Amino acid sequence: MTGFGKSFSENENKKISVEVRSLNSKQLDLGIRMPSVFKEKENDIRSMAQRMLERGKVDVFVLLESSAEQKSISLNKPLAKNYYKELMLLASELNLADNNYIEIISKMPEVWKHEKNDINEEDWQIVYNVVEKALADLNVFRDDEGKVLAKELSSRINKITLNLSSIQKMDGLRVQHIRDRIKNNINEVIGNDKVDNNRFEQELIYYIEKIDITEEKVRLKTHCDYFIKTMEEASSGRKLGFITQEIGREINTIGSKANDAEIQKLVVEMKDELEKVKEQLLNVL
């Protein structure tokens, strides 16, 4: 499920800002970008995200801005002086003119010391809290999106239910129309006086039983009601997917048995609504 969360903390020396973005994914795919000074604490962020988020392709961006002067590079003066003395001695032995050796010395190994800032636990706790707030903000975003999605899914399922109600009203007339059509066709072919009415009724009952959709209508209504109820459960995306499979199975069976043009139109509309439900379910946790 898509989402966005943002949080920050600022004092007179530092500003820590965190952004969290998520896209739909079947599992939790977590990417973290943070200052190297906090890199050893990355597992703490991962543990927090796994606890607060269930799935999604989630990217966490941590930015640390400092207004205080920080000395991260320093000159190794004793070593630089030794280089200078050796260069001067060599120049004297070779009778070379005294030159400016600063540029040469500045490029010598280990003249510059890169100081590694130790992790500040106080700063880390601030980072941890800000990340936690950003993840919580992401969940609020997802919840809001989920509410909109729930309305959309309910609307689609309700349209299927309304079409089912229309089919139920048409089903009684459908059977009568089929009976009349078969009888008229037989009369046109072999004549009314040659029809064995008792045998005709027996065969007709057998045929009507084969195209009866009473069970399918009951099961379809049950599945639709169960879908609406299941949406209230936590982490119901996969379960809803299974229910849509059952809904689709009943709709297809009604369509294959209907033998009625108007009912077939309603079946096509129900299939269209169900496909839209399946597309939206890809975003449901």
Image (spheres, rainbow, N blue to C red):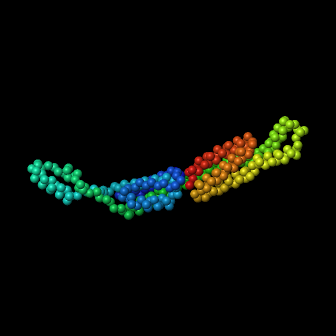
Residue 44 vertical placement versus 95 (above, below): below
Viewer-nearest residue: 15 or 177: 177
Please tell me in which quadrant of the rendered image residue 242 appears: bottom right
Question: Residue 201's x, y, as percent?
Answer: 85, 46
Viewer-nearest residue: 70 or 200: 200
Residue at figure coordinates x 82%, y 47% from the top left: 205
Residue at figure coordinates x 74%, y 52% from the top left: 215
Q: Outermost residue toward the right? A: 193
Q: Outermost residue toward the top? A: 188
Give the position of the C terminus as an image quadrant.
bottom right
Question: Residue 16's x, y, as percent?
Answer: 40, 56
Residue at figure coordinates x 59%, y 54% from the top left: 237
Q: Is residue 11 in sight in this rendering?
A: no
Q: Outermost residue toward the bottom? A: 121
Residue at figure coordinates x 20%, y 59% from the top left: 78
Q: Is residue 116 left or right of residue 125?
A: left
Question: Residue 232's x, y, as percent?
Answer: 62, 57
Question: Residue 176's x, y, as percent?
Answer: 81, 44
